Image: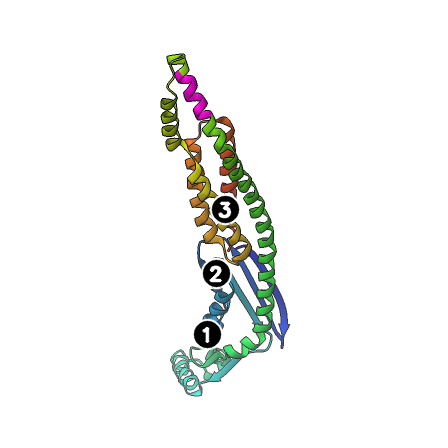
Amino acid sequence: MNSMTGYGYKEALVDNTQISVEIKSVNSRFLDLSINLPSFLNPLESRLRKLVSEKIVRGKVDLTIRVHDNNSTARVSADPVAAKLYFDAIAQIASALGKSTDAIPLSLIIQQEDVLNVSHQFNAEAYWKKIEGIFFQVCKQFQEDRAREGENLCKDLLSKLDTLDECAAFFRKWQPEMEKRFKEQITKKFNDLLGDHVDENRIMQETAAMLVKYTINEEIIRLHSHLSALRTEINTNPIPGKRIDFICQEANREINTIGSKNQFTEVGQMVITAKDALENIREQAKNVE
């Protein structure tokens, strides 16, 4: 089990190129991946997106790669024809003003557009060879951070699930007592009304009707089933977040029904405990991948 939150960072100098890689993530219902690269590394984006997507299923993930090459990548070219045209044009202006062409500085010519052209030659694949070692180290660090937090989440989820198992066991143990109390209440009601002329068959009929309305046997069976499925997901599914949320919804339905049928304080208190534990699991599931 992994948490959806994690962080990894490394900075290193490789072949006179300063490289930093950072990966961080927070909760999200789906995988929301943002990749921030220098523009000359854009050809690598699809590869990086595939590599990250293979490791992460859910979370808002930000991958940032920064590169500063201490070796110059500049390529400078001159256009003598353009320089000559600029010089001739400026010389015409100088002559019209009675100025000598000797006063025209070279700096004035070379700063004109297209006289000197500067470009940078970048080879994305060459840079990837420098970046990939650092990238995979950061991915490992990031995954270990998510796994470490996921282990803590797993312990907390199992602790809350133990509480739910205790609640379900209490409901099952209490069910015969509920039936007994229903019969006692109905018998007392008839005795108060009819005294010694109580019809035992009538009492049994009324009790049966009450049990049909208020029995929680089916809800208990389904609740045990949901809790068993929940434990299986937590213990065996490496990415159980969505399944946990779904099963919690089903378990919550059974607990609500038990609460609505309940007539006794003891059961009501345990319903509150169960709902609190289940809500904690649902909240924690939002942090689980």
Write down the residue under mark 3: 227
The spot of residue 129 in percent (x, y) is 56, 77
Give the quarter of the image for residue 207: top left
Question: Would you place residue 33 above or below residue 89 in this image?
Answer: above
Quadrant of the image occupied by residue 200: top left
Name the residue rendered at 44%, 54% in the picture: 29
Residue at label 1? Answer: 43
**Residues shaded magenta:** 181-190
Q: Is residue 18 left or right of residue 29?
A: right
Residues at badges 3 and 2 in contact (C-beta under 8 Å)?
no
Instruction: Point out the tag, 3 or 2, that comes first from the N-terminus.
Output: 2
Kind of residue indicated by mark 2: Val
- Residue 187 on the magenta segment: yes
Earlier residue among tags 1 and 3: 1
Q: Residues within 10 Å of mark 1 (few under 14, many from 20)?
A: few
Residue 4: percent from left, percent from top? 52, 55
Observer-nearest residue: 256 or 139?
256
- Circle 3 or circle 2, nearest the eye: 3
The image quadrant of residue 46 is bottom left
In this image, 130 relative to 113: left or right? Answer: right
